[in-house]
Amino acid sequence: MIKKMDEKYQDITTYKIGEVAKRADVNKETVRYYEQRELIPKPDRRRSGYRIFTQRHIDQITFLKRAQQLGFTLTEIKELLDLRLDENTTCSKIKEEAQQKYQDVSKKIHDLQRIQETLTNLIDCCSEDRPIGDCPILEALEGKNETGKQLRK
């Protein structure tokens, strides 16, 4: 078994977890978490118990980080990875996933713009010399004025 393991990695550069983390620009706990979530292939282990990582692991972690930067959740990324492994998947299925993410992001942007507008209005109608009991910002958060009623929608 040990000899076969040595032969398996004979011409392959292997890494310990710290080196993988460094090369992928994450911390070791992230690598462990991705392994636990089955987002990266389960690495073999040396006799000493150390995991045997390869460039494939580093590439996969880099893929995960890029997908996260585009707003994909780890669950969505797992779905993308599963689709990638499915020989029957076409690019159109991946495109559907990207279009859904685009719609989600567009909705979030719209919601953030609405929040920004509401905050701007609240800030503009606040007179700093009013007593705290007449503060329009607090009234809105308490739902006591028209803006506050709009926040509940």
Image (cartoon, helix red, strand yellow):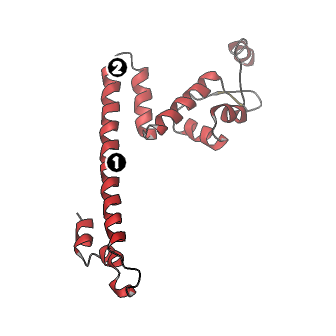
Left of 46 or right of it: where is 43? left
Report which residue position mark 2 lands on: 91
- Residue 117 percent coordinates (x, y): 31, 60
Amino acid, disc 2 = Cys
Report which residue position mark 1 lands on: 109
* Foreground tag (2 vs 1): 1
Q: Is residue 89 visible?
A: no
Give how far apart the Cα atoms at labels 2 and 1 are. Answer: 27 Å
152, above or below 70, in the image: below
- Residue 54 percent coordinates (x, y): 65, 23
User: Residue placed at 35% from the left, 59% from the top?
Assistant: 116
Q: Residues within 10 Å of mark 1 (few under 14, many from 20)?
A: few
**Marks 2 and 1, the one that precedes in the sequence:** 2
Q: Are marks 2 and 1 in contact (CB under 8 Å)?
A: no
11, above or below 135, in the image: above
Left of 77 or right of it: where is 148? left
Q: Quadrant of residue 75?
A: top left
Q: Residues within 10 Å of mark 2 (few under 14, many from 20)?
A: few
- Residue 4 percent coordinates (x, y): 70, 14
Amino acid, disc 1 = Ile
Q: Quadrant of residue 16?
A: top right
Give 115 or 123, whichever is nearer the viewer.
123
Residue farthest along the right direction in this orientation: 48
User: Residue placed at 35% from the left, 77% from the top?
Assistant: 138
140, above or below 73, in the image: below
In the structure shown, which secondary structural element does the residue marked by tag 1 occupy?
helix
In the structure shown, which secondary structural element does the residue marked by tag 2 occupy?
helix
